[in-house]
Amino acid sequence: MSGPAGTPAIDGARLLGRIRRLGTVGALPGGGVCRLALGDADRAGRDLLVRWMEELGLAVSVDAIGNIWGIRAGREDGPPVMLGSHIDSVATGGLYDGALGVLAGLEVCAALDDAGRVTRRPLAVAAFTNEEGARFAPDMMGSGVHQGALDLEEMLAVVGIDGAVLGAELDRIGYRGAVPVRSLTPAAFLELHVEQGPVLEREGLRIGAVTGVQGISWTEFTLHGQSNHAGTTPMAMRRDAGCAAARIALEARAIADDLGPPQVATVGVTELSPGLVNVVPERAKLTVDLRNTDDAVLKAAEARLMAAAEAHAAAEGCRLESRRLARFAPVEFDAALVARVEAAAAARGLPARRMPSGAGHDAQMFAPNCPTAMIFVPSAGGISHNIAEHTGADDLVAGAGVLLDVALELLEAAE
Amino acid sequence: MSGPAGTPAIDGARLLGRIRRLGTVGALPGGGVCRLALGDADRAGRDLLVRWMEELGLAVSVDAIGNIWGIRAGREDGPPVMLGSHIDSVATGGLYDGALGVLAGLEVCAALDDAGRVTRRPLAVAAFTNEEGARFAPDMMGSGVHQGALDLEEMLAVVGIDGAVLGAELDRIGYRGAVPVRSLTPAAFLELHVEQGPVLEREGLRIGAVTGVQGISWTEFTLHGQSNHAGTTPMAMRRDAGCAAARIALEARAIADDLGPPQVATVGVTELSPGLVNVVPERAKLTVDLRNTDDAVLKAAEARLMAAAEAHAAAEGCRLESRRLARFAPVEFDAALVARVEAAAAARGLPARRMPSGAGHDAQMFAPNCPTAMIFVPSAGGISHNIAEHTGADDLVAGAGVLLDVALELLEAAE
């Protein structure tokens, strides 16, 4: 889709080429990528991104939590319009989750260059550290620190699932930058992302104008019982930490079933110790991920889960420890900006709808501080955090086009 | 308790000294031992045992699965009376589980030496490889191969929880012996062991005359679902392998509760993959350990578990794989020998009862092939497979005394 001379247009081949190239970094057999935050593959992806930014003439900055952004100068100084997302992934991630938003931002810069356009405001393209939270909790960490929702020193001390300390990993891969955090609040923030859910595809739509992000609550439970012989210990005398953990896991499922959509609940981690066939587990650890767009309902789900965890632990004679790993309240995006996204999709003849985001995104960290919105494109089968994640090339390019159009309005807008 | 000259008597201090000394091999902080089968600590324990056997003048043999026995010659040739158990442990084991039966056997030899007694039949003291099954499944492996219930080649190829191959570990620690398996069937087999359960202590008894061993069934279930995003995947669209695993684990508990004692059920292992807070688990593995003294009831429990596993997997849209890790039918010991144990306890004024064993033991492998029985001594609090495992010194010595008395009868008995 190339426009008349002087009119910036997305070069689909160039955008898809960069997405495929970044997808070779941390590539998994059978497809998908593993670029866990601050691992070697994440470093290689960061190096590639920085090289592309420099090739586009952007002024590259790295801050103290490892966020990377490149700024394209405008006719006037002042805060830039920021287009950003992340390039880290879960252990079994896809090619588009996060990468699309960052690389589409680069494509917007390239399209402006092709058209010889210098915009009124500066344009910044950003990639934020550890959005996934798969190796280090909490998620949205880089954008959270960047916008002041999370404390830098606390985050640098976080220990990962592999025992690594976040600050030490930043040093190891060479991405603990000199720029202080909280040093930049953009004039506006836009994030293009795959939906990671089934709604757009199921309804035959191309674009989602994201109205906000559902609240997220992560809790880790540890149950302490008594290890004992699996053959000689009567059931009535057992204090089986694994049994209590299983009851809590199914309570989480029941909470989601009882509350109904959009409430979801997930137990992603369950670990028993000593973990032997013929030994009653002494200790069990599990995590529960609860999400809802309505904070009052989310709080009710949290309360029911905690009460049930205490009851199941007590019934099994186990001691319960609980730890809050992450908690984000639901977020509302800027109504005017959401309307601009809808209008841009309509102008391009792309069927669209307003929808909340089921996943957490870096954009939610900017929403309290500047006009913020997101653009979704469909995810085939709703599959995400899976090497089978896929979005059609036409949808990727269409989303980048909407991003370009809305960004241009913001870049030229008067104060 | 030293007897008149010429009458063999247990030297309690000597027996307890050997138990404490072996307890320093693989000792854990806070007490207990970790001597997982064929690990470095197991090798060190074997080396110590062989040294003690040689110091007692026993003729030491090691067979092709690593079983160790030492023979004390008798006035006549022919099959020996065997006293044996094991010296391997679970990862968090106690000082007496297994070690007592082996070291009490050595003490019987020493007591006979002290009394200058040469018995009619030879006496063999044995330690069998991998009784616990904590590192390599199935348990009772060495005695099972020794008595022909398990195939040598299959067992040598077993892969442990740490990925090690059993045969290679036997070579590594230098205990793949030259003696063919199945080469020795004793005239009778006796095993002194801690109860590992609460019954004797609760009833104020000192000795258990073990009538048999309950049947044991180990099954490993693997569920294959679909990994997906924890925030954007509606509950109705999930195929959560962890959720199905939790339902199967609680079904195992319900089976034991519904059938009532002596049925027990234990889920000692539960593993989720990829095991991340915000990813719906794609794969889950769990093990179920079912035991009962009545094989018909045990079979019913197995059938109900399998049907429930298939139903829960199907309801969650998961594919179910199941693997039988171990299966032993209930075993009945020799009625005449059980009566001898009861009589020996009575003659020593030790309150005793007949009882089944809740745990599997090496003795059950001998029961089909020669007169076999076991002697139990109390376990404090019924605690077992735990570093807090404990049996009072008086009970340990009393059990060894009963072992000596019954062994002497068998050693002098005419054909």
Image: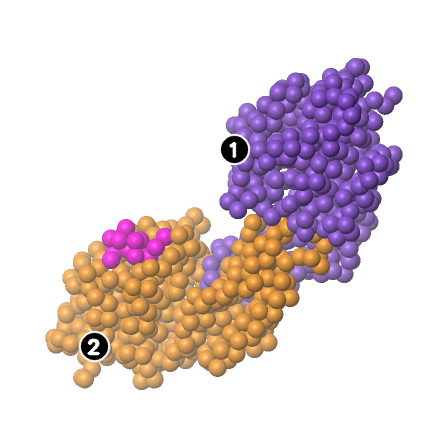
Chain colours: A orange, B purple
Q: Chain of mark 1?
A: B
Amino acid type of the residue tagged 1 in the rendering: Asp
Task: Say yes or no: labels 1 and 2 on the same chain.
Answer: no
Identify which residue is drawn at 61% across, 27% down: B49
Q: Nearer the viewer, residue A60 or B21?
A: B21
On-image quarter of the N terminus of chain B: top right
Residue A56 position in % (x across, y down): 18, 61
Amino acid type of the residue tagged 2 in the rendering: Leu
Secondary structure predominantly adopted by residues drawn in magenta: helix
Q: Please check the rendered image and state whether residue A394 is part of the magenta-colored stretch, yes or no.
A: no
Identify which residue is drawn at 23% across, 63% down: A63
Q: Please check the rendered image and state whether residue A170 is part of the magenta-colored stretch, yes or no.
A: yes
On-image quarter of the C terminus of chain B: top right
Q: Residues within 10 Å of mark 2 (few under 14, many from 20)?
A: many
The residues colored magenta run A164-176
In front: label 1 or label 2: 1
Identify which residue is drawn at 55% across, 52% down: A273
Q: Chain of mark 2?
A: A
Question: Element type at marker 2?
Answer: helix
Q: Nearer the viewer, residue B130 or A4?
A: B130
Above or below A360: residue B56: above
Above or below A159: residue A250: below
Query: Picture quarter containing residue A5?
Result: bottom left
Above or below A372: residue A232: above
Q: Residues within 10 Å of mark 1 (few under 14, many from 20)?
A: some
Question: Element type at marker 1?
Answer: helix
User: Given the current orientation, which residue lies at the most extreme front position?
Assistant: B4
Q: Which residue is mark 1?
A: B40
Q: Nearer the viewer, residue B281 or A103?
A: B281
Residue A200 position in % (x across, y down): 45, 73
Q: What label sits on residue A411 in the rendered view?
A: 2
